[in-house]
Amino acid sequence: DVQLLESGGGLVQPGGSLRLSCVGSGFTFNLYAMTWVRQAPGKGLEWVSALSGNGANIYYADSMKGRFTISRDNSENTVYLQINSLRVEDTAVYFCARVGSWNSRVGFDYWGQGTLLTVSS
Amino acid sequence: IQLTQSPSSLSASVGDRVTITCRASQGISTHLAWYQQKPGKAPKLLIYAASTLQSGVPSRFSGSGSGTDFTLTISSLQPEDFATYYCQQLNSYLLFTFGPGTKVDIK
């Protein structure tokens, strides 16, 4: 079975940095693009970033450019999200997801359970 | 590309037919997906390519549309369908947008 497991969330002070991790299993990790989506408390889904299976193609939502860095280590079946200069408004549950077949425009077919990041002093 | 959804919320009864609309700010062909999210849970993919049902999703869910206007229909609302529904555009490679969501609750 396909599984995605995020980790790395927690309580961080404004201005700090954090790296979130997501380990995938049950599928050939390097064949799939991966993505991060966040959801602030009581709010909707916000796409953050995505990268291709080999990591060569990387994209960010306009509002995420500059402080967010996505990366992956295919030898460890892991995708990362580095967030710098954390702000209170970055408080959210961060989900990782697998991007299904692009040719078929499948969308995000598998999701992790999410990891909560709280930015507060 | 921006997405709008209507209504933002609705109240319905078990057995009702429910329709949610999603409008894109520019044409996106059929490059649209729909997700269901229940409180405290990750979203679940329901429909992709505007009208293709994801494996395991009940047939009471259907999608239609192309270009800028899309709909998600639940033919007979079941108790487990009370949730928030999001549309998502997939028009450009690895660039995505979600709609603001439609909350479906019990009348």
Image (spheres, coloured by chain):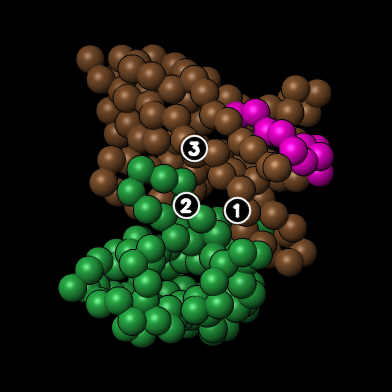
Chain colours: A brown, B green
Q: Nearer the viewer, residue B25 or B56?
A: B56
* Quadrant containing the N terminus of chain A in the rendered view: top right
Q: Residue at x 34, y 61 (%)?
A: B83
Q: Tell me if residue A26 is in the magenta stretch.
A: yes
Q: Residue at x 43, y 22 (%)?
A: A9
Does label 3 lie on the same chain as label 1?
Answer: yes
Q: Chain of mark 2?
A: B
Other residues around mark 3 within 10 Å, as few (<14) / some (14–19) / many (≥20): many
Q: Nearer the viewer, residue B36 or A47?
A: B36
Q: CA distance from mark 2 to mark 1?
A: 9 Å
Q: Which residues are magenta?
A: A22-31
Q: Which residue does the numbered mark 3 point to in the structure image?
A: A113
**Image-quadrant location for residue A39:** top left
* Residue A108 numbered tag: 1
Whether residue B46 is situated above or below residue A65 in the rendered picture: below
Q: Which residue does the numbered mark 2 point to in the structure image?
A: B43
Give SS at disc 1.
strand
Q: Tell me if residue B107 is in the magenta stretch.
A: no
Asked whether the residues under the numbered discs 1 and 3 touch, taking CB atoms below 8 Å apart as contact, a structural biologist would say: no
Residue A34 at what x, y percent from top left? 66, 42
Other residues around mark 1 within 10 Å, as few (<14) / some (14–19) / many (≥20): many
Query: Mark 2 is on which residue type?
Result: Pro
Q: CA distance from mark 1 to mark 3?
A: 13 Å
Query: Mark 3 is on which residue type?
Result: Gln
Asked whether the residues under the numbered discs 2 and 1 touch, taking CB atoms below 8 Å apart as contact, a structural biologist would say: yes
Give SS at disc 3.
loop
Q: CA distance from mark 3 to mark 2?
A: 9 Å
Q: Chain of mark 1?
A: A
Q: Nearer the viewer, mark 2 or mark 1?
A: 2
